[in-house]
Image: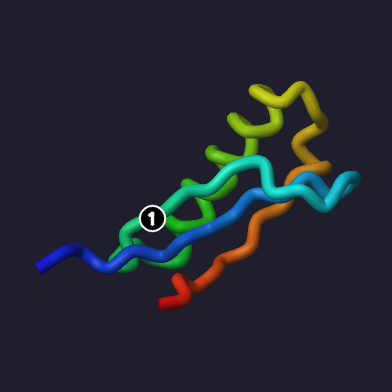
Amino acid sequence: MDTAEKHYKFINSRTGYVIFYSSLDAKLSPEEVKAELDKIKAQVATKNGIHEHTVYWEEFKDVV
């Protein structure tokens, strides 16, 4: 059986465009999720040459 995952999209607040997608194990604690999302957000901002506070994330559900 596959491990359940939660899916997130990282968005540039200035443009409204999704600039990165990521998934995390659903078994992570809320503190672990926040730490991972903050780390990913910093990496995404650096890679795209934008300020970290310009990037935000949202959880999304797969539509089947």
Quarter of the image for the N terminus: give it: bottom left
| Left or right relative to 62: residue 4 | left
In the rendered image, residue 20, in percent from the top left (x then y), is placed at 59, 42
Q: At label 1, which amino acid type do we have?
A: Leu
| Left or right relative to 41: residue 23 | left
Furthest toward the right, the residue is: 14
Residue 25 figure quarter: bottom left
| Left or right relative to 63: residue 26 | left
| Residue nearer the viewer, 39 or 18 | 18
Disc 1 packing (10 Å; few <14; some 14–19; many ≥20): some
- Number of disc labels: 1
Furthest toward the bottom, the residue is: 64
- Residue carrying label 1: 24
Rendered image coloring scheme? rainbow
Instruction: State the residue at coordinates (46%, 57%).
Output: 33
Instruction: State the residue at coordinates (47%, 76%).
Output: 63
In the rendered image, residue 12, in percent from the top left (x then y), is placed at 78, 45
Q: Secondary structure at mark 1?
A: strand
Instruction: State the residue at coordinates (53%, 48%).
Output: 21
Furthest toward the left, the residue is: 1
| Residue nearer the viewer, 5 or 36 | 5
In the rendered image, residue 48, in percent from the top left (x then y), is placed at 71, 26
Residue 64 figure quarter: bottom left
Instruction: State the residue at coordinates (47%, 47%).
Output: 36
In the rendered image, residue 52, in percent from the top left (x then y), is placed at 75, 36
As drawn, 37 above or below 5: above
